[in-house]
């Protein structure tokens, strides 16, 4: 593990030095990333210009949901966002060059073309989260205050595990980046809205099958004092770290299986 982290850091640092060679370009792309991701929240603001609540949730509550999932996803995207390029490497045979290096393949794939511009997404999510926290009508306790950073870190780990599992799937599918994106980018969009507007079967799916609900839905219901649409107990709100650990373990197993099944193109 230590070797993988060190290798990841060295590769990411190399790409950061390359990026900072053109600082104006870096600033422009980061601002562009900030603005592009901000359009999602602009859509929500447009909705609230016509309604007072969405699924029974006020604008600050939606901002809280939006900010927590966007920040958590942004952290995972920054660290693991390059995993969606794995299918291309499998198809054209360039993955072979990574296999012959004395560095863990996962670290190489994840750090490949490390994009510091993704900080724009994280910054935008934090700003919306700050607005939501400043305007929420919540009786804050020590547990609820601690829940916020817990959600961000655990949610980032859950999204990161989905990135890795999606990358592992590409060893067999080879052209499945869009399938992976449906769970990562699609999951992020889903979690920006309250669970009350979705069918219960969908809520069950993202709670018990692909547990994205533990990124923010389940702990947010505890923070906001809302009832769970599935009638789940409040203590589940404290499980995101455990869920994240299980997801990371399963993703690691999927990665090992996928890597063992890889057969070179022979080119």
Image (cartoon, rainbow, N blue to C red):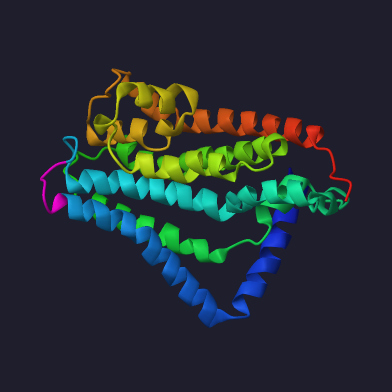
What is the number of callouts on the image? Answer: 0
Report whether residue 30 is seen: yes
The residue under the point 51% across, 41% down is 159
Relative depth, front residue between 246 and 146? 246
> Along the horizontal axis of the image, is 37 left or right of 14?
left
- Vertical placement of residue 30 versus 212, above or below: below
Q: Is residue 112 magenta?
A: no
Q: Residue at x 36, y 56 (%)?
A: 126
- Which is more toward the observer, 120 or 198? 198
Is residue 134 in sight in this rendering? no
Answer above or below: position of 30 versus 108. below
Give the dominant element type of the magenta stretch: helix, strand or loop: loop
**In the image, residue 15 lies at what x, y percent?**
67, 67
| Residue lying at 63% horizontally and 61% vertically, measured from the top left | 114
Q: Residue at x 33, y 44 (%)?
A: 192
Q: Quadrant of residue 94?
A: bottom right
* Rendered image quadrant of residue 173: top right
Stretch of the chain drawn in magenta: 48-53
Q: Nearer the viewer, residue 181 or 20?
A: 181
Place of residue 78 in the rendered image (x, y in percent of width and height, measured from the top left): 55, 55
| Coordinates of residue 49 in the picture (x, y in percent) | 13, 54
Q: Quadrant of the N terminus?
A: top right
Side of 65 where 121 appears, left or right? right
- Using the rendered view, name the quadrant where residue 165 is placed: top right
- In the rendered image, residue 49 lying in the magenta stretch gets the answer yes
Taking 236 as reference, is 1 above or below it? below
Q: Position of residue 32 (x, y in %)?
A: 43, 69
Q: Is residue 141 left or right of residue 182?
A: left
């Amino acid at each position: 593990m230590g070797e993988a982290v060190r290798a990841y850091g060295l590769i990411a640092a190399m790409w950061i030095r390359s990026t900072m060679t053109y600082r104006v370009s870096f600033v422009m792309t980061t601002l562009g990333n900030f603005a592009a991701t901000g359009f999602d929240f602009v859509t929500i603001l447009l909705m609230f210009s016509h309604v007072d609540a969405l699924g029974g949730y006020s604008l600050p509550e939606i901002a809280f949901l939006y900010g927590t999932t966007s920040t958590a996803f942004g952290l995972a995207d920054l660290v693991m966002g390059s995993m969606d390029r794995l299918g291309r490497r499998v198809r054209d045979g360039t993955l072979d060059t990574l296999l012959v290096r004395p560095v863990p393949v996962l670290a190489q794939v994840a750090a490949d073309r490390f994009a510091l511009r993704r900080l724009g997404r994280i910054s935008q999510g934090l700003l919306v989260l700050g607005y939501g926290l400043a305007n929420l009508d919540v009786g804050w306790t020590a547990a609820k205050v601690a829940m916020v950073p817990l959600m961000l870190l655990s949610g980032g780990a859950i999204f990161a595990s989905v990135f890795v599992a999606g990358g592992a799937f590409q060893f067999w599918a080879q052209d499945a980046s869009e399938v992976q994106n449906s769970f990562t980018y699609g999951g992020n969009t889903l979690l920006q809205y309250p669970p009350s507007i979705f069918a219960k079967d969908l809520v069950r799916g993202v709670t018990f099958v692909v547990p994205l609900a533990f990124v923010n839905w389940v702990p947010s219901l505890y923070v906001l004092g809302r009832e769970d649409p599935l009638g789940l107990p409040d203590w589940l709100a404290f499980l995101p770290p455990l869920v994240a650990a299980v997801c990371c373990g399963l993703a690691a197993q999927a990665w090992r299986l996928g890597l063992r099944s890889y057969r070179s193109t022979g080119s």
